Amino acid sequence: MDYFGSAVSLSGDGNTLAVGASGEDSEVTSIGGYQGDNSANEAGAVYLGYQSPNDYEAVVLPKVA
C-alpha cells in the first residue's frame, strides 16, 4: 500500500501542493521514471502539483536515492 495522502501541504499562495506517499515502493529517482518495479520497499515519495497559468500540473518529486 502506498499510503498516498499520508501527508499533505499547500503553499501559502495556494499554487503548489505536496502530497506524501510514505509507503511508495518504486526504485524511481527521477521525474518520469518507471514506478512499477516496487523494488525499494517502503521508500516513499512526494508528489507535487503546481498551478500554471492555464492549468494544474502534476509531477513526481524524486525520492532520496
Image: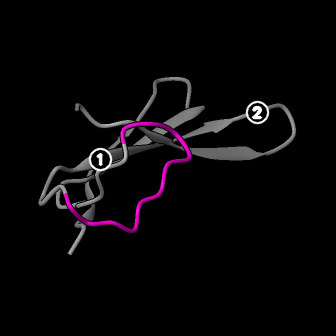
Mark 1 and mark 2: Cα distance apart in space: 22 Å
The residue at which mark 2 appears reads as: 52
In the image, which residues are magenta?
29-39
Residue found 23% across the figure and 31% down from its top? 64
Question: Which residue type does callout 1 highlight?
Answer: Ala
Comparing 4 with 38, the one in front is 38
Residue furthest to the left in view is 41
Where's residue 51, x and y in %? 68, 36
Residue found 47% across the figure and 57% down from its top? 34
Where's residue 4, x and y in %? 31, 63
* Callout 1 crowding tier (Cα within 10 Å): few <14, some 14–19, many ≥20: many
Describe residue 51's horizontal placement relative to residue 25 as left or right.
Answer: right
Residue furthest to the right in view is 54
Q: Which mark, residue 7?
A: none
The residue at which mark 1 appears reads as: 45
- How many numbered discs? 2
Comparing 18 with 46, the one in front is 46
